[in-house]
Image (cartoon, grey):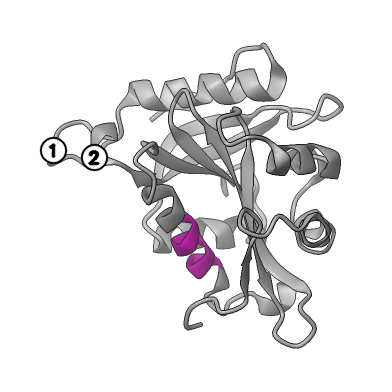
């Protein structure tokens, strides 16, 4: 897949109708209920001010024929730890194994890296050891291809809505790290304090209180 000519940026073009179509047609089929926040929560994050913790931006890849969403990403900003979280990445089943997901990740990471504010860019991933299905294995292979590095094992996703449960058996994967986020000039190791700061901020924004259960690797 050469580039993303039909990529719509919902920051530049805040189209909530298109965002809802992405949610209903692409995200809902791709994520278990406890991993996916409600449409109302996502909409609030997309409309939030940039400096508000947990504010989000989304990109949507559109079908060239009917302009329907076929893939997309949602990233969330955590200003205290200066970290972006790739909360959702999904591709319609008809368009998988065409290189769409790596292209979307490359586009997202370039947006993160363009800001001097960004120290870290991470994603959550189901641990294939805990989710022994082909979808989890496929995502793991994809993150390996884009050079993702595991930051935390036994990671627990916080409640994305008050009526949902935490999700255990996750991995926290690093997709981008600014030089200031690394241990030493020649190291590829992210400072553990930064990882812990993000996790604490993530839980505070998501749940308002409560302590995460995770093991930093």
- State which quarter of the image contains the C terminus: top left
Q: Residue at x 43, y 31 (%)?
A: 82
Left or right? Give the position of 108 relative to 194. right
Which region shows up in magenta?
101-108
Residue 157 within the segment the image draws in magenta: no
Q: CA distance from mark 1 to mark 2?
A: 7 Å
Q: Quadrant of residue 36?
A: top right
The answer to whether mark 1 and mark 2 are in CB contact below 8 A is yes
Q: Quadrant of residue 197?
A: top left
| Residue under label 2 | 179
Q: Is residue 64 above or below residue 152?
A: below
Picture coordinates of residue 33 (x, y %)?
82, 43
Q: Residue at x 62, y 53 (%)?
A: 11
Q: Is residue 119 above or below residue 98?
A: above
Secondary structure beneath dot 1 equals loop
Q: Which mark is residue 185?
A: 1
Q: Nearer the viewer, residue 209 or 30?
A: 209
């Amino acid at each position: 897949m050469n580039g993303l000519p039909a990529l719509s940026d919902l920051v530049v073009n805040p189209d909530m109708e298109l965002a809802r179509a992405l949610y209903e047609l692409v995200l809902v089929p791709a994520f278990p209920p406890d991993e996916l926040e409600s449409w109302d929560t996502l909409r609030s994050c997309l409309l939030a001010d940039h400096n508000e913790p947990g504010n989000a931006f989304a990109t949507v890849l559109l079908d060239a024929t009917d302009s329907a969403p076929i893939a997309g990403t949602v990233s969330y900003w955590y200003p205290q730890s200066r970290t972006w979280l790739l909360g959702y990445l999904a591709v319609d089943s008809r368009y998988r194994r065409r290189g769409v997901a790596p292209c979307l990740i490359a586009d997202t990471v370039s947006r993160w890296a363009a800001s001097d504010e960004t120290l870290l860019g991470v994603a959550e991933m189901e641990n294939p050891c805990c989710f022994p299905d082909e979808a989890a294995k496929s995502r793991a292979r994809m993150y390996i291809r884009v050079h993702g590095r595991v930051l935390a094992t036994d990671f627990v996703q916080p409640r994305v809505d008050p009526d949902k449960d935490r999700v255990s058996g996750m991995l926290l994967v690093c997709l981008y790290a600014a030089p200031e986020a690394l241990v030493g000039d020649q190291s590829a190791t992210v400072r553990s304090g930064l990882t812990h700061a993000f996790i604490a901020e993530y839980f505070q924004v998501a749940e308002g209180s409560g302590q995460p259960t995770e093991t930093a690797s």
